[in-house]
Amino acid sequence: MQGDQQRLAVAYHRYCQALTLAVVPAALVLAFFADHLVLLWTRDAELTRAVAPLVSLLVIGNMLNGLMHLPYSLQLAHGWTPAHSESESGRCRIVDARDLPGVRPLASLLRPLCGSF
């Protein structure tokens, strides 16, 4: 049993490193050069000024979501899902993203760009 956990830890670490090497550089290039890529794609400078910051945020969010795939998959494979349910009480726990730390200040900064949400 201990050997299986050790092998799992080594494999998990390697896969996380490989995923990070594949996802992060590409996402950072897209995020930092979103304005150039949107301008190349649309050929519209006004649209580029309006959309490029949102594209950067979208790319960073997708990068973070992609990096969470392996931990989430391992969590599900292990049978540990407290993020979805409370095993002791049997009730579902619902988290409102607006209540997470830092989301409200970020929302107030983005409201002029995105509108209310």
Image (cartoon, grey):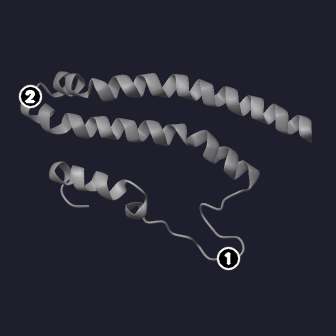
Name which residue lies at 42% across and 23% down: 26
Name which residue lies at 41% across and 64% down: 99
Residue 29: x and y in percent read 35, 22
Name which residue lies at 48% across and 28% down: 23
Q: Nearer the viewer, residue 42 or 113?
A: 113
Residue 18: x and y in percent read 60, 24
Q: Quick one: quadrant of the C terminus?
A: bottom left
- Quadrant for residue 107, please give it: bottom left
Name which residue lies at 50% across and 38% down: 66
* Real-space CA distance between mark 2 and mark 1, rounded to the nearest whole angstrom: 54 Å
In the rendered structure, the answer to whether residue 25 lies left or right of residue 9 reads: left
In the rendered structure, the answer to whether residue 71 lies left or right of residue 97 reads: right
Badge number at residue 45? 2
In the rendered structure, the answer to whether residue 3 lies left or right of residue 76 reads: right
Q: Nearer the viewer, residue 113 or 69?
A: 113
Instruction: Name which of mark 2 and mark 1 comes first in the sequence.
Output: 2
In the rendered structure, the answer to whether residue 44 lies left or right of residue 85 reads: left
Q: Quick one: quadrant of the N terminus?
A: top right
Q: Which residue is mark 1?
A: 90
Marks 2 and 1 close (CB-CB < 8 Å):
no
Q: Nearer the viewer, residue 42 or 29?
A: 29
User: Are there few (<14), some (14-19), or many (20+) residues within 10 Å of tag 2?
Assistant: some
76 w.r.t. 117: above or below: above
